[in-house]
Structures are given as C-alpha cells and as structure tokens.
Amino acid sequence: MPRSAGNTVRRSTAPPDAEVINNSPSRYLIEDWRAYYWVVTERGDLMDRRVTIQLPLGYADVCPEVEIGQSGCVYRVRRWGVACYASLLEEMGFDPGPLLTHDQERFPGGEGQEILPMMIQATHFDLPGYFIIAGQQYPFLLFDPGGTLKGSYTKWRTYLGALAWLVSEGKVNADFELLRITNPGLYRKAVDYLLGALRG
C-alpha cells in the first residue's frame, strides 16, 4: 500500500516564469537570496532553474556558511519549493508584532495563533517548476545576498524518483538514491524506461 505523501508533492503555486519570490511584499525589510535547483517537467525533461527569494533582512546574519550536503538554513525541499528554518527569525530578532492583524474571526486563538502562519509565510516559498528534485546528484543550493552558500538539500527526490511518481500517478513515492549509488546502470535503465512510458 503506498504511503501518504500529504502536501509534500502538491503542485507549486508560483508562476512558471517568476524570477523573484516574495510572500509578503512591503510588510518588512528583505534581502535577496539566490536559489539554484533542478526541476522535472511534465514530459520528464530535466531542467536547471534559478530564482531570487526574499527573506527578512538579517536572516543571512544567523545562517552559517555550509558545504553541499549540509542543510544550513534549509529545513526541507519538496515538490513545490523550499522551506527555510522559521526558528531563525526569533534568533535574528524578527519582530512580528507590527505585522499582526489581531483579526479575531480568522485567529480566535489570539496572537499565538496568528504568529505561526506568519513565520511560515516569511520562510517557506513555492518556487517555479513542475516537480522540484533535490538529491546528491542534483542538489538544491541556496546562497545569501553576498553569494555565500548558506543552505543545501540532498534528501528529497532524485530524477528517477520524480519520474516514478509522475508515471505511477503518485502511487510510487520514493527517492531511489540508494539505487543510484549502488547500481547506476540499473538506475539509468529505469530512467530511460520511465521516460519512454511518460512520453507515450
């Protein structure tokens, strides 16, 4: 029985041609980060992408420099985009107070209920692409405004993993990283087979 994927493989809501992603325009000062990543198209083509994401000003100051394979400020990558650590906002002194709406109808639990979605909105980004992948072969990379690598992710779906999910219409939800490492020939054959199936 296939395991539930939850919202990890939902479609991205970002416009396909977007170059800058900002979830809260003009609500707080921002800094430009560059994301470099790979996507799989509906036809199974592999494409590299790059986009600017705008995090709250000061986020770079609390993120250490990393090497590829170290997550740094990247919490996770999913089909739809990237989630950075919301907890770092508190560390950098980000004050959500002035941004709160105090809307009792939407947030009957008060400020505490409103702050969490606000922190998530400031650090989670839908990115352009049909199916974003991130493995050891095609890592997700995130650079701060100065060009320093501050985040990477290599534990999401491989190219084969994305193809398997697409061909099976979501029934196969696996990364296939171990297969790629231990039997690259079989991995390549599986990629070719699934590409043929996807393209009819």
Image (spheres, grey):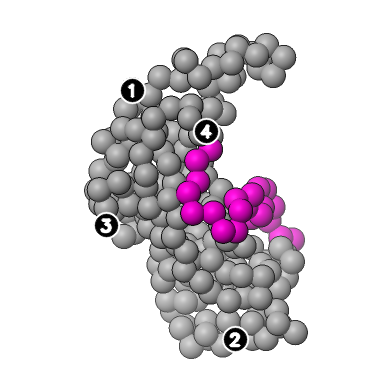
Say what amino acid the circle numbered 3 marks: Glu
Disc 4 and disc 1: Cα gap in Å? 18 Å
- Residue 28 part of the magenta segment: no
Q: Residue at x 53, y 38 (%)?
A: 23
Mark 2 or 3, nearer chain start = 3
Q: Residue 67 got which mark?
A: 3
Q: Nearer the viewer, mark 2 or mark 4?
A: 4
Say what amino acid the circle numbered 1 marks: Gly
Label 4 SS: loop
Q: Position of residue 60 (x, y in %)?
A: 30, 39
Q: Is residue 33 above or below residue 168?
A: above
Q: Is residue 124 above or below residue 152?
A: above
Disc 2 and disc 3: Cα gap in Å? 31 Å
Disc 3 and disc 1: Cα gap in Å? 26 Å
Mark 2 or 4, nearer chain start = 4
Q: Nearer the viewer, mark 3 or mark 4?
A: 4
Label 1 SS: loop
